Image: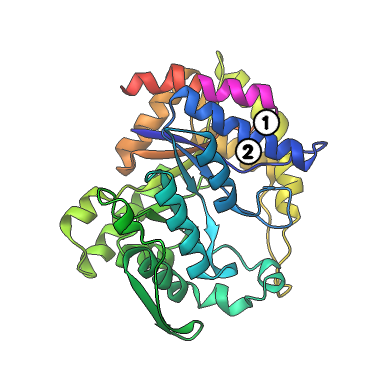
Amino acid sequence: MRVGSFVLGAQFPGQGQGEALHRAVRSAEVAEEAGLDTVWLAEHHFVPYGTCPSAVTLAALLLGRTRRIRVGTAVSVLPTTHPVALGEQAALLHVTSGGRFSLGVGRGGPWVDLEVFGAGLQAYETGFPESLDLLVRWLREPAVAASGDRFRFREVPVVPQPSQALSEVPGPEVVMACTSPASVRVAAERGLPMLLGMHVGDEEKAEMVALWRRHARVAGRPDAEIHDAAHVSAGVCQIADRHADASEALLKAMPGWLRQGLGAHVTVDGRARRMRDPLAYTELLCGLHPVGTPRLCADRLAATSERTGISRFALLVEGSGDLAATEENVRRLGTEVLPRFR
């Protein structure tokens, strides 16, 4: 079992953006002190749902401030960046951190980001596979050229080459966020582990893992790769001496953040979007994930792992919105929950 934190840099009502980012950085530092395996960093633009606009930049900061813990993006939004630029950044972090960096990528949404960064709606709707393939090639090959619909350039050398710089580590792992059967197929055909969202439960995650395996076999991926695929399950974690206290801490803070954060998303083409009810969504998350006493949290993580076959977790620990409470939550996760698996 490998348990990490999932950091959004969430801006709760009444808080400043600097306060949200300080809590994000501090919670990551505490995660290493508490013995967690990984810190996963989210990326958002122009919304208080998450105040980190560049997960790879924040990852660089945290890799410099830590010595042991793995740092990953969850996720870097591929349609709004050039895959070679992201590949260069990922290779640089992989090499300079001694192989402690994981690159999580995703398709994002049809947000105004596509307009601001000049990517266009097509980059989101149809261009993701081309960008993904170019990114993966950049991280695995010594030289790369492109002749696709979106990217065309002559062959250039990859510098630095992550596979050469650390012979024992072939390159940064690439994990792909999957929210639909179509995205599961894209990941499986390329042998990429999935990052599955906190909005779905164990049954649906188990179905997505099974679907990934079927597509991977049809694509001819090696049996060992299929068997050893290290998928990641995102969730929420809040620890207290009583189950009711843990739930209350989230129910007091998260609905206001969700209402403010999710409501700020703007679609690039004016398409209608339906926002979840913030209170009902928080209640759902409390029921699905490790929210409660240390024993209950450990039991829920073990149950999810058994039902889905997933052994890596990215847990949102900042749901209270308070710095001191977040630090305590991370420490309890490391000292009172993780030892139950070791």
Q: Earlier in the sequence, mark 1 or mark 2?
A: 1
Q: Residue at x 60, y 19 (%)?
A: 244
Which part of the image, by quadrant, shows the N terminus?
top left
Residue at the limit of the structure toward the top, as seen here: 241
Q: Residue at x 55, y 52 (%)?
A: 56
Magenta-drawn segment: 321-331
Image position, residue 277 (x, y; %): 69, 47
Q: Secondary structure at mark 2?
A: helix
Q: Which residue is mark 2?
A: 282
Q: Residue at x 26, y 52 (%)?
A: 167
Disc 2 marks a residue whose amino acid type is Thr
Q: Nearer the viewer, residue 98 or 221?
A: 98
Residue 311 falls left or right of residue 249: left
Image position, residue 157 (x, y; %): 38, 73
Disc 1 marks a residue whose amino acid type is Leu
Image position, residue 28 (x, y; %): 55, 33
Q: Which residue is mark 1?
A: 251
* Residue 35 inside the magenta-drawn segment: no
Residue 19 falls left or right of residue 242: right
Image position, residue 13 (x, y; %): 79, 38
Which part of the image, by quadrant, shows the C terminus?
top left
Residue 190 falls left or right of residue 35: left
Q: Residue at x 30, y 61 (%)?
A: 191
Q: Is residue 248 visible?
A: no
For disc 1, the neighbor class at 10 Å (few under 14, some 14 to 19, many from 20) is many
83 relative to 241, above or below: below
Q: Quadrant of residue 139?
A: bottom left
Q: Nearer the viewer, residue 63 or 221?
A: 63
* Residue 328 inside the magenta-drawn segment: yes
Q: Is residue 82 visible?
A: yes
What is the number of the mark on residue 19?
A: none
